[in-house]
Amino acid sequence: MDLASQFGQAVRRHRELLRLSQEALADRAGIDRTYISGVERGIRNPTLSVMQRIAVALGSDLDVIFATARELSVRQEK
């Protein structure tokens, strides 16, 4: 699985834990809902600054999102 897909799955996991819609997350991050959808599906390759905005909108740090991405990746490899 590529990095964009891993990051997207981690974003989705955090968003769902917070019970946020893609639209609510997009509003918090100041980006379009369709962009969030693309990030979660791994078809968008967000810049580091956009990743940071998403993490902040999730009430988290970017390193926590990356740690979740690694954890999900390891689980899928097993």
Image (cartoon, helix red, strand yellow):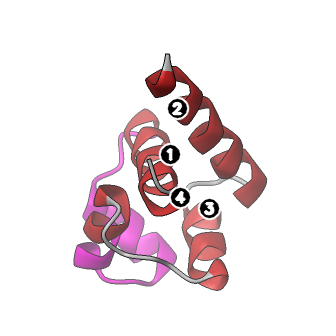
Q: Give the amino acid at mark 3.
A: Ala
Q: Label 2's element?
A: helix
The residue carrying mark 2 is 72
Q: Residue at x 45, y 83 (%)?
A: 30
Numbered circle sitting on residue 50: none
Which callout, 3 or 4, points at the residue further toward the start of the chain?
A: 4
Mark 1: give few (<14), some (14-19) or many (20+) Cα within 10 Å. many
Q: Where residue 47 appears, x then y in whole percent?
A: 58, 83
Q: Nearer the viewer, mark 2 or mark 1?
A: 2
Real-space Cα separation, disc 3 to disc 1, in angstroms: 10 Å
The residue carrying mark 3 is 55
Q: Nearer the viewer, mark 4 or mark 1?
A: 4
The residue carrying mark 1 is 10
Residue 57 left/right relative to 17: right
Q: Are marks 3 and 1 in contact (CB under 8 Å)?
A: no
Numbered circle sitting on residue 3: 4
Q: Are marks 2 and 1 in contact (CB under 8 Å)?
A: yes
Q: Label 4's element?
A: helix
Q: Give the amino acid at mark 2.
A: Leu
Q: Are marks 2 and 3 in contact (CB under 8 Å)?
A: no
Which callout, 2 or 1, points at the residue further toward the start of the chain?
A: 1
Query: What span is colored magenta in the figure?
Result: 18-36
Which callout, 4 or 1, points at the residue further toward the start of the chain?
A: 4
Real-space Cα separation, disc 2 to disc 4, in angstroms: 11 Å
Q: Residue at x 53, y 35 (%)?
A: 73
